[in-house]
Amino acid sequence: MTIRKIAQIGHPVLREVAREVTPDELASPAIQTFIDDLIETMRDANGAGLAATQVYETIQICAIEVGDNPRYPYKPKIPLTILVNPKIEHLTDETFDNYEGCLSVPNLRGMVKRTARIRLTALDRHGAPIDAEFAGFTAGTIQHEVDHLFGKIFVDRVTDPTTFATWAEFDRHHKPKFLESVGAIVDKYHRA
């Protein structure tokens, strides 16, 4: 496996719309190796997810995994998930506020409104269909990664630019208030 370089905001690849992956391509050793590299790169950077466009490949593949992530300790766990050709259907008009960051936008966070409940259809890395509903922070994480495949970065979704903060200033000035809202979001969408 290879740890790949992550594209930074301003690089044109982050604004490209990725193309779908064919079943034959997905089964190829080259794409399977790429998926392994994507996972390794995401884990090395402590990301909650990573899209192919972020490592200079304009194909519709992203990896998502949330464990004990030091960047997002409040996020519910998500097992390693590979999404190929993902499509999102918004199941509600209800949104929640999420302070997001991105490996392609180093040291910056901002408040994004994310749809609270979504339906995701995609393929896994072996071509098996995924069709599931997600809510809360998990839905937000999926939306963030799928956005990358369509040339969108979280900064495009920040409606109030006064919420932008470096990670240190977020921790110092915004984290306590945000963590108050986190509990309500987790209780509403992630408690069984």
Image: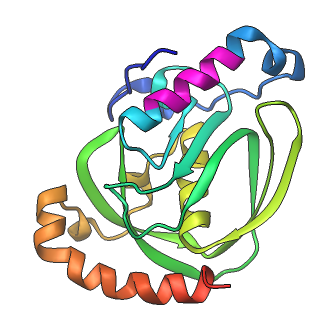
Vertical comparison of 168 with 44: above or below: below
Residue extending farthest to the front is 68
Say if residue 150 shows up in the picture.
no
Residue 36, magenta (yes or no): yes
Residue at image location 54% in from the left, 32% down from the top = 39
Left or right: 22, with 157 as reference point: right
Magenta: main secondary structure equals: helix
In this view, the residue in front, 112 or 40, is 40
| Position in image of residue 173 (x %, y %) | 12, 75
Residue at image location 19% in from the left, 57% down from the top = 167
Residue 157, magenta (yes or no): no
| Position in image of residue 123 (x %, y %) | 82, 40
In this view, the residue in front, 12 or 188, is 188
Q: Which residues are magenta?
A: 32-41
Vertical comparison of 145 with 187: above or below: above
Residue at image location 76% in from the left, 29% down from the top = 20
Q: How is the image coloured?
A: rainbow
In the rendered image, which quarter contains the C terminus? bottom right
Left or right: 173, with 136 as reference point: left
